[in-house]
Image (cartoon, helix red, strand yellow):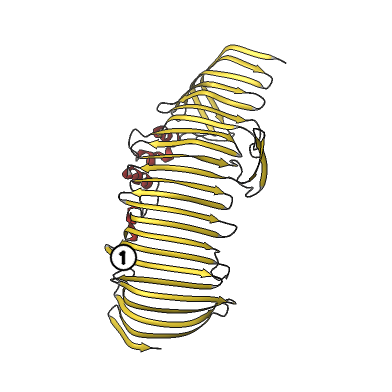
Amino acid sequence: MWTITADSVRLQADNALYATTGSHPMPGLDFNYLQAKDIEIAVADFYNKGTSIRVPLTTLRATERCGLELRASGTFAMDGKTMEASDFHIATQRSDIRLDARMGIGDMTSDPDLPLGVKLKGILSANDASMAFPIYAPMIKALPQPRDINIRVDADGLPARMKIKEVKIQLPRVLNLAGNGEVKNLTDFKSMGEKRVFSEGGIVTSLAWGMGGKINFEGAVTDPKAVKATLAALKMDSTITIPALKLKGSADYNPGNISGNLNLTTGSGKLLADGRWVARKEAYKADIDLTSFPVDAFMPSLGIGDISATVHLDGAGYNPMSPKTSLAADIMVDKVIYNGKPYTNAHLKADAKNGDMNAFLQSANPDANLDLSAHARIDSGIIKGSLNGEIRDLDLHALGLMSTPCRGHIDIAGKGQYNPRAESIIADVNISDFDWLMDTTRYYTPSLT
């Protein structure tokens, strides 16, 4: 078998062009039209024997048409099983990256045993990105200088099971994110739920196929003004804002099964959330705890300020007309600021099981002082139910739900049934102590049946 070696190889060129047939250069870095100048490539101790090759790149210099000045060095090696890039140093005018990577030779979409790994650390300049992709220049311009993104990645394993040891992204004085965990079936987006077998270190394991995994994450936004300016440059929904915050949590995803938790703090407010969704059973569960959480810091147009509340949801099934659908919901609002006014001790509870549904709403607040209860049963597609309650004081105008006066009180007791197929309603309703102001007209009756 031939062995080829070279002590040194050096190539130089004033200009070089790579372009697909018929393409025309677009602004920035166009991968269909790459044009470079002042090119220099130097290799030392080149080695090739059969399928084994080793290319120690001592120098790579070039200036691309978009203005990026590339400098690189490192060693590329390949044998019949893997290819590796080791001790690579890649730099531009402002970016500086160190890279080690390895990848198995073959089709990763069908062979889960191929090795895969990457270690990367350094600085990515947003200004370089603006030069390469000018369409994002307005967004990047909104970021504070120096606009350098610190990045670190350490991942290793197989396409079937990739261990994410570390991922860190930091834009100084603006935001930072970090994560770790495991990703399964990295290259499979289609075979959801299919069983496959792979081996690692002689150990054979059977896994549910389809991309999945578990990621732990944490991060912070430290400069909300910069984030707001960036979102505005992207023409994002202006009704949503991002305040200074800290977050920590985890997400666990497997085909048809998602669970996770989140701890988010902003100012003196806190949100704790834990949930799960199982597609096959149409099952879901969520527990949310809010403590002085400023909703208006994220969505100011809703009129909701600080809220302290607990939310519990546990159910299965999405069709409310099915007797197989079950639900247990309990929402307790200890305190909320709504349209500048405080409201306390509001409680909503609902449950559904075997076709029976119950709901209770209680509030003793000014402009929302009421007790309501409802019951319904689904029988052969027909909904039979009752509604009872005492609305002692309800002011929809004060609550911001109506633009004109709409306030009053009423006692109600009713029962009836609704047939969706026939679109028919039969009801027996008793109303007492009805006194209501609609705009400038007042309606009153001591009783009505």
Is residue 110 something that shows in the picture? Answer: no
- Which residue is at the far right? 1
Residue 304, compared with residue 57, is above or below; it is below
Instruction: Tell me the residue that label 1 is attached to.
Output: 344
The residue at the point 53 percent across, 66 percent down is: 326
**Type of amino acid at the residue the image marks with label 1:** Thr
- Which residue is at the far top? 7
Residue 228, compared with residue 156, is above or below; it is below
Q: Nearer the viewer, residue 127 or 110?
A: 110
The residue at the point 61 percent across, 26 percent down is: 83
Q: Quadrant of the N terminus?
A: top right
Q: Position of residue 430 (x, y in %)?
A: 41, 86
Q: Position of residue 445 (x, y in %)?
A: 33, 87
Q: Position of residue 235 (x, y in %)?
A: 39, 49
Q: Quadrant of the C terminus?
A: bottom left
Is residue 207 something that shows in the picture? Answer: yes
Q: Position of residue 160 (x, y in %)?
A: 61, 39
The residue at the point 35 percent across, 53 percent down is: 298
Where on the picture, by quarter, is residue 169?
top left
Residue 275 appears left or right of 220: right
Where on the picture, by quarter, is residue 203?
top right
- Number of marks in the image? 1
Q: Secondary structure at mark 1?
A: strand
Neighbour tally class for label 1: few under 14, some 14-19, many 20 plus, Cα within 10 Å: some
Residue 8 appears left or right of 238: right
Q: Nearer the viewer, residue 239 or 162?
A: 162
Where on the picture, by quarter, is residue 302?
bottom left
